[in-house]
Amino acid sequence: MFENRILRRIFGPKRDAVTREWRKLHNTNTTRVTKSREVSWAGHVACMGEMRVAYRVMVGKPEGKRQLGKPRGRGEDNIKLDLQEMGWGMDWIDVAQDMGRWRALVYAVMNLRAL
C-alpha cells in the first residue's frame, strides 16, 4: 500500500484527454508505467555490453544463500515474466538490439496489449 501511494505521488495526477479533468492514477496505471519503464531500462542495459556492471547485475546469477523458500532473484527473470504476460516468448536481449522492435514492445507493455 505504501509503495503504491509513493508511486502515485511520484507520477502525479494526470489530465484526462476527453473530459480535460484532473484525476489520480489508480494502482493498475502505476503498474503499467512501472513495467514499461523497467522494460525500457532493460533494453538500454542489453545494448550496453557484457563488460558493463549494469549488464552483469541484470543477467548474472546472484551468489550466496537465501532464506528457505525464497529463490534467488534476477532482474532478467522479472523482464521475462513481464514479456510472457504480453505473449512475447523470445530472447529479450536479441530483441533489444533492434531499437524499433524494442520500442514497439515497450509501448505494448505500457498499453498491456499484445502486438
Image: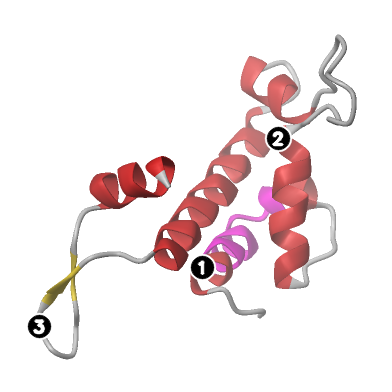
Label located before the other in sequence (1 or 3): 3
- The secondary element bearing badge 1 is classed as helix
Amino acid carrying label 2: it is Gly
Dot in front, 1 or 3: 3
The boundaries of the magenta stretch are: 95-107
Percent from the top left, x then y, of residue 11?
Answer: 28, 51
| Mark 2 surroundings: few (<14), some (14-19) or many (≥20) residues within 10 A | some
Q: Which residue is mark 1?
A: 107
The relative height of residue 6 versus residue 15 in the rendered view (above or below) is above
Secondary structure, magenta segment, majority class = helix
Residue 20 marker: 3
Label located before the other in sequence (2 or 1): 2
Picture colour scheme: secondary structure
Percent from the top left, x then y, of residue 42?
Answer: 62, 41
Indicate the quadrant containing the C terminus: top left, top right, bottom left or bottom right.
bottom right
Q: Is residue 26 left or right of residue 98?
A: left
The relative height of residue 14 versus residue 96 in the rendered view (above or below) is below
Quadrant hosting residue 62: top right
Label located before the other in sequence (3 or 2): 3
Q: Residue at x 70, y 21 (%)?
A: 57
Q: Of 27 and 38, which appears nearest the observer?
A: 27
Q: Residue at x 84, y 19 (%)?
A: 67
Residue 75 marker: 2
Q: Is residue 31 left or right of residue 84?
A: left
